């Protein structure tokens, strides 16, 4: 499976980055291309995408002190996609790292579009947190 690891330096402590990414209220602020609104029920985020996808489910790994923000996206057809995400210390700030996979059935063009979308999201959360 083809993948692309994206990262961005953020001049904010890792705990603050971790908390922001795990906060469902903040998701539409930095991932607006895929998250129009979020509702949380029993620890599962129901994300209205505002696209043909409709509502997807996001389930994060357990809260942890290691900066692991892995989450699974469950599409309406039941397909599940793992998104490995880490926040690590980088000097006085942080490094936010996101792995994008080209899943089965995803065209090269769709993969490139996903990579570009994640790049935009990372830049947006950097701006949001550093402002």
Image (cartoon, rainbow, N blue to C red):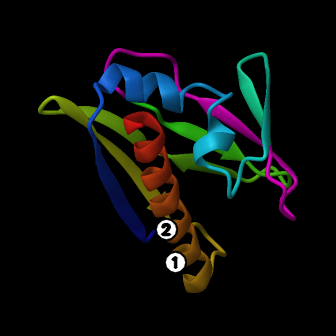
Left or right of 21 in this view: 31: right
Position of residue 59 measured from the top left corner of the image (x, y, whole percent):
65, 31
Could you say which disc has been placed on residue 103 in the image?
A: none
Q: Is residue 102 visible?
A: no
Q: Report the front residue among 69 and 29.
A: 29
Q: Is residue 108 above or below residue 49?
A: below
Left or right of 120 in this view: 99: left
Position of residue 131 measured from the top left corner of the image (x, y, whole percent):
42, 37
Residue at figure coordinates x 55%, y 47% from the top left: 82
Q: Report the front residue among 123 and 78.
A: 123
Position of residue 7 measured from the top left corner of the image (x, y, whole percent):
32, 53
Q: Is residue 61 magenta?
A: yes
Position of residue 67 measured from the top left corner of the image (x, y, whole percent):
35, 26
> Residue most toward the left?
91
How packed is label 2: few (under 14 Cα within 10 Å), some, or many (20 or more)? many
Residue at figure coordinates x 34%, y 47% from the top left: 97
Residue at figure coordinates x 34%, y 59% from the top left: 5
Q: On the image, which quarter does residue 26 sit in?
A: top right
Q: Report the front residue among 9 and 58.
A: 9
For mark 2, give the secondary structure: helix
How packed is label 1: few (under 14 Cα within 10 Å), some, or many (20 or more)? some
Q: CA distance from mark 1 to mark 2?
A: 5 Å
Q: On the image, which quarter does residue 85 sit in?
A: top left
Disc 1 target residue: 112
Disc 2 target residue: 115
Label 2 near label 1: C-beta < 8 Å? Answer: yes
* Range shown magenta: 48-67
């Amino acid at each position: 499976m083809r993948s692309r690891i994206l990262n961005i330096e953020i001049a904010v402590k890792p705990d603050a980055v971790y908390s922001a990414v795990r906060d469902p209220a903040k998701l539409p602020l930095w991932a607006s291309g895929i998250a129009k609104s979020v509702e949380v029920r029993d620890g599962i985020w129901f994300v209205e995408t505002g696209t043909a996808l409709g509502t997807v489910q996001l389930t994060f790994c357990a809260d942890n002190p290691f900066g692991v923000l892995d989450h699974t996206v469950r599409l309406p057809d039941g397909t599940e996609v793992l998104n490995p995400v880490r926040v690590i210390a980088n000097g006085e700030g942080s490094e936010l790292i996101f792995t994008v996979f080209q899943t089965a059935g995803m065209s090269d063009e769709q993969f490139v579009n996903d990579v570009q979308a994640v790049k935009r999201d990372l830049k947006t959360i950097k701006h949001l947190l550093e402002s």
